[in-house]
Image (cartoon, rainbow, N blue to C red):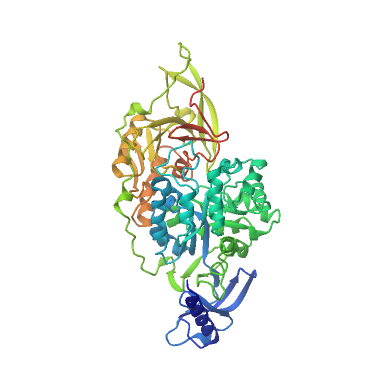
Amino acid sequence: MSTEKITKRTQTLVDVAMGRTPADLVIRNGRWVSVQSGEIIPSTDIAIKSERIAYVGPDASHTISDETQVIDAAGKYLVPGLLDAHMHVESGMVTVTEFVRAVIPSGTTGVFIDPHEIANVFGLRGVKLMVDEAAEQPIHIWVQMPSCVPSAPGLETPGASIGPEDVAEAMSWKGIIGLGEMMNFPGIFMSDENMHAEMAETRKAGKVIGGHYASPDLGLPFHAYAAGGPEDDHEGLLMEDAMARVRQGMKAMLRDGSAWKDVDNQIKAVTEMGLDPRHFVLCTDDSHAETLVTEGHMDRVVRQAIIQGLAPITAIQMATINTAEHFGLGTEIGMIAPGRYADVLLINNLNEMDIQKVVARGKLVAEDGQVQIDIPAYEYPDWVKSSVHLGRSLKAEDFRLTYSGNNESQPEIVSANIIGVIENQATTRHLKLELPLESGEIKVDISKDVAKIALVERHQATGGVQVGLVNGFGFDVPCAVGTTVAHDSHHLIVVGTDEGDMAKAVEILAEMGGGQVVVRDGQVIGQVSLPIAGLMSNERAEVVAEQAASILEGFRACGCELNNPNMQLSLLALVVIPELRISDLGLVDVTKFEFIPVIDG
């Protein structure tokens, strides 16, 4: 913005504050939640001109004219708009526009998104699409440039790749706030040149480096990771994790998404250990469309922090001022104060975070849970809707898992390396189970909750299929669940107890151009179409939520009782989170970052 425009803006705000120019909107008689001072101040008025706050004080009557819109807060709390410090829009299976439409009534007025899902499919041009769409939204959407595409070079094959030169280019784009989560944490502590070059480009641009240290090891590798430069981290699970990050100068990002519930343990670093709460921020990371529509967004996360014993104003600070200041935006957002964007929530009860009205950028955008403004649909180009390339039709036999040991005589029992799903956590267990061989083949074992998992390459049409075993879904009937949402390279993943159903699930996903599907006994019982990069729908969030609910119902019909199992499924190929994952190149032991066989011997 030019000096002339900034000068005109500040002069106008001063003129409103002095009463020389009328405000466009005045909110009267509220209880000001001043996150910057830690106070709740009664009988407060807010005067707004255009998109920004001009005056906050006991009486704004001098700013009111016949043209001024006046909202009587009637003693309700005036809270800064909520900020999500780190999340992936694609995880909601909706576009940026439809995500915004879904979360505005929940009081979200600013989001920091990392589009590394679409980056793994389409690279830099996919990121630019998200940046362009974000710029058209009625709330603040800042984009973090994806850092690790692929997330672990040599362990997976993405649809595209990103390097230091791409990061350098993106840092010049308007709307880029920093570098997305640095998932290749071994690359940092092993001094990988490309990873450090990407961080250097970000520092050169004066922007924030996002972190992702998914290891439980808080020894030298963790200290080295912190020395490398990441400034925040959302991968902590325990109180000790949060404490370690804050002590090393990072912001501890406590996440509460649809499936990852990490606030409860980590918040104890504040409530029990007394650490300074200003170094903690809240985020969602991954939120399912159904969660956004039925449970809310950052209001839900703030509420959860309060339930865990945090004072309401402290919890609100973790979703407002703490986040804003972390990203260098304290003069723009994160508090109700003159000069900042007019992002204000009217709330009846802070403990319950029941939001009655939402003002974003100076406009009333939602009231009583309903959006009050027009948000035009965003049109994506055709090329982004063609991303599933299998190269061949798959049959049931493609999902066989055979033993190829060196002995001439086949053993009756073999030891298998199995991915163990952990409910409500992104991590998995590396299980070892003894399983019988039947004519040289490993079969599923419902009694031991052992199903098959297959990763089907979908970017280069190689026809490649990697088959492994998974425990924890609880399937008790012949079935299969398939998805093209498979972090981070987003190949096609299918889990099941019947090879024929697995083949059918893959066939349907290819025909749809991406999505999720549940097949039971040869019949489709759940389905959501995601044609945009195989990750997102172009439908409204409530439509996607309804379709996605059919997936969850399908999981249950197959015997699965996990909370949001499709989120668990989508991460089974994420080769940077311990302990065991599957990629297009094989089964990966993430604790050692090496391939291991599915069947030992």
Residue at the extreme right: 273
In the image, is 247 to the left or to the right of 417? right
Q: Quadrant of residue 491?
A: top left
Q: Report x, y in % for residue 459.
A: 36, 40
Q: Report x, y in % for residue 184.
A: 54, 43
On the question of residue 255 being in view, the answer is: no
User: 517 above or below 502?
Assistant: below
Q: Quadrant of residue 131?
A: bottom left
On the question of residue 66 being in view, the answer is: yes
In the image, is 396 to the left or to the right of 80? left
Q: Residue at x 62, y 46 (%)?
A: 225
Q: Residue at x 57, y 56 (%)?
A: 203
Which of 130/538 is in front?
130
Q: Report x, y in % for residue 260.
A: 53, 47
In the image, is 493 to the left or to the right of 190? left
Residue at the extreme top: 408
Which of 253/7 is in front?
7
Q: Report x, y in % for residue 123.
A: 41, 48
Which of 297/513 is in front?
513
User: 498 above or below 387?
Assistant: above
